[in-house]
Image (cartoon, grey):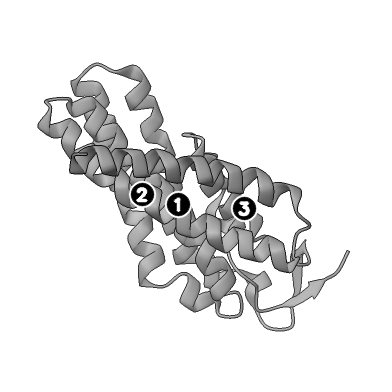
Amino acid sequence: MKLYELIRWTHVAAGTLALLGFWLNAALRKGSPLHSRVGEGYLLVMAVVMATALPIAWQAFANDEPVRGVFLAYLVVITATPTWLAWRAIRDKRDFSAYIGVPYRGFAVASLLSGLAVLAAGLYYRVPLLAGFSLVGIVTGGLMLRFARRGTAQPWLAPNRPCPVPYPPPHPVPVGRQRASAHRTTMVTPAGQSHPGKRCIARKP
């Protein structure tokens, strides 16, 4: 079996596992040990999906299929972004400044620039669907940068202030966006909703 075929089938297998993991975790009780374990496994499988998508995109360019190559490369960016957000929303749930650090801003810039590049490609090759899909990266990247710039200045992030959202922090938002990417689509939600735990007093429902 050629290397490309091995990569392609690995991509297909990982994508299938990601879809199964999505539906399995959706059925599990949130916060349970199994929910956490399946979620971690899901993120690892999605990492494989993205890693194998890069050479597939490269091969598309090599085969003189620029539209397909651009689209696949773009999918890697808009999938990697919410994957990272989902992971760091858990790891940095007690450190908001760490959450909106350099990697967060890097993914924001990558989303914005890749969206602009896809918009340009869609207009150049006269593919309206590609141009329209560019809004995912443009809007997501813009909202993330806006949130990183204004997030720590929000009054509800001040110590001892009541949180404006229910307890616990909304970790499922970036996870939802990232899981949607496994279905080759992405939901755009305000980046301000995908932050980790806040430095304020959470109000339990």
The residue singled out by tag 2 in the image is 50
Q: Which callout, 3 or 1, points at the residue further toward the start of the chain?
A: 1
Mark 2: amino acid? Met
Residue 123 vertical position relative to residue 112 in the rendered view, above or below: above
User: Could you tell me how far apart the alpha carbons at marks 3 and 2 are, in whole angstroms?
Assistant: 20 Å
Residue drawn at x 20%, y 19% as measured from the top left: 125
Position of 62 compared to 197: left or right? Answer: left
Quadrant housing the C terminus: bottom right
Task: Return the x and y of residue 173 as percentages of the image width and height.
Answer: 62, 52
Few, some or many C-alpha atoms within 10 Å of disc 2 (few <14, some 14-19, many ≥20)? Answer: many
Return the residue found at the far front.
1
Mark 3 surroundings within 10 Å by alpha-carbon count, few (fewer than 14), some (14 through 19), many (20 or more): many
Disc number for residue 46: 1
Q: Nearer the viewer, mark 3 or mark 2?
A: 2
Question: What is the quadrant of residue 72 in the picture?
Answer: top left
User: Decide: marks 2, 1 in contact (CB < 8 A)?
Assistant: yes
| Residue under label 3 | 173
Task: Name the amino acid type tagged 3.
Answer: Val
Between 5 and 69, the residue placed more toward the observer is 5
Q: Position of residue 142 (x, y in %)?
A: 41, 49
Residue nearest the viewer, comparing 63 with 2? 2
Real-space Cα separation, disc 3 to disc 1, in angstroms: 17 Å
- SS at circle 3: helix
Nearer the observer, 110 or 175? 175
Q: Mark 1 is on which residue type?
A: Met
Tell me, yes or no, if residue 90 can be seen here.
Answer: yes
Q: Residue at x 46, y 65 (%)?
A: 148
SS of the residue under disc 1: helix
